[in-house]
Structures are given as C-alpha cells and as structure tokens.
Image (spheres, rainbow, N blue to C red):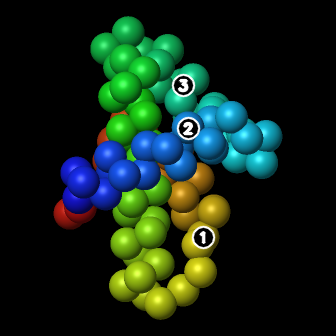
Amino acid sequence: MDEIVVALLPAIEEQLASPETAYVKEAFDRLTSDSEIDDEEARHMIAFCLADEVETMKNEDRQFNADRYQMLLNLLPALPEGR
C-alpha cells in the first residue's frame, strides 16, 4: 500500500488547503503538535487513511464515505489494522 499512499500525497495537499476538508487540516495540526511526528509523517498517516477508504470503496462497491474517512483521521496516530 506504500505506493498508493505516496500517490495520494498530492490529494492530501489539496485537502489540507481546502476549506471543504477542514477536518484534514485539523488532523494534520493535531498530529504535528506531537513533537515525535513531523509534517511528512503526518501527511503519510493521512494518506494512509485515504488509501484505506479508497480500498474499502472498491471492496464494497460504494461511494466515498467522508464520515468514515474523518473517523479514521480521528483515530490517528493509530493506523487501521490489517492494511
């Protein structure tokens, strides 16, 4: 999944800048307030959550679930298991 995470980093940058996805910026700010998590690691964690949601969309043949994505972000720095 590492390749997918890296491929999603541009989308994360867009989400961080967009007022429509303010919850992504909130998660980023929360993560980077931890002295052990740098900006790059926080972006990768967020991209991992997005990748998990995209993979789940494909597996369940459904639309993007912003509530689920936001829930995953709220769980960070813990990452979804089994991914």
User: Relative to 72, does residue 39 appear above or below in the rendering?
Assistant: above
Q: Which residue is mark 3?
A: 30
Q: Nearer the viewer, mark 3 or mark 2?
A: 2
Please state, as top left, top right, bottom left or bottom right, where the N terminus lies in the image.
bottom left
Question: Sequence order check: which comes first, mark 3 or mark 1?
Answer: 3
C-alpha gap between disc 2 and disc 1? 19 Å
Residue in the picture at 49% in, 44% down? 10
Q: Position of residue 27 (x, y in %)?
A: 56, 34
* Crowd around label 3: few <14 · some 14–19 · many ≥20 (10 Å): some
Name the kind of residue labelled 2 in the image. Answer: Glu
In this rendered view, identify the residue nearer to me: 8 or 35. 8
Cα separation, mark 3 vs mark 2, equals 16 Å
Q: Is residue 63 above or below residue 13?
A: below
Image quarter in which the C terminus is found: bottom left
For the residue labelled by badge 2, is the local secondary structure a helix, a strand or a loop?
helix
Question: Residue 69: x percent and y percent?
Answer: 54, 58
Identify the disc placed on residue 65: 1
Residue under label 2, please give it: 13
Labelled disc at residue 36: none
Secondary structure type for disc 1:
loop
The kind of residue tagged 1 is Asn
The answer to whether residue 75 shows anywhere in this view is no
What residue is rendered at 63% in x and 63% in y?
A: 66
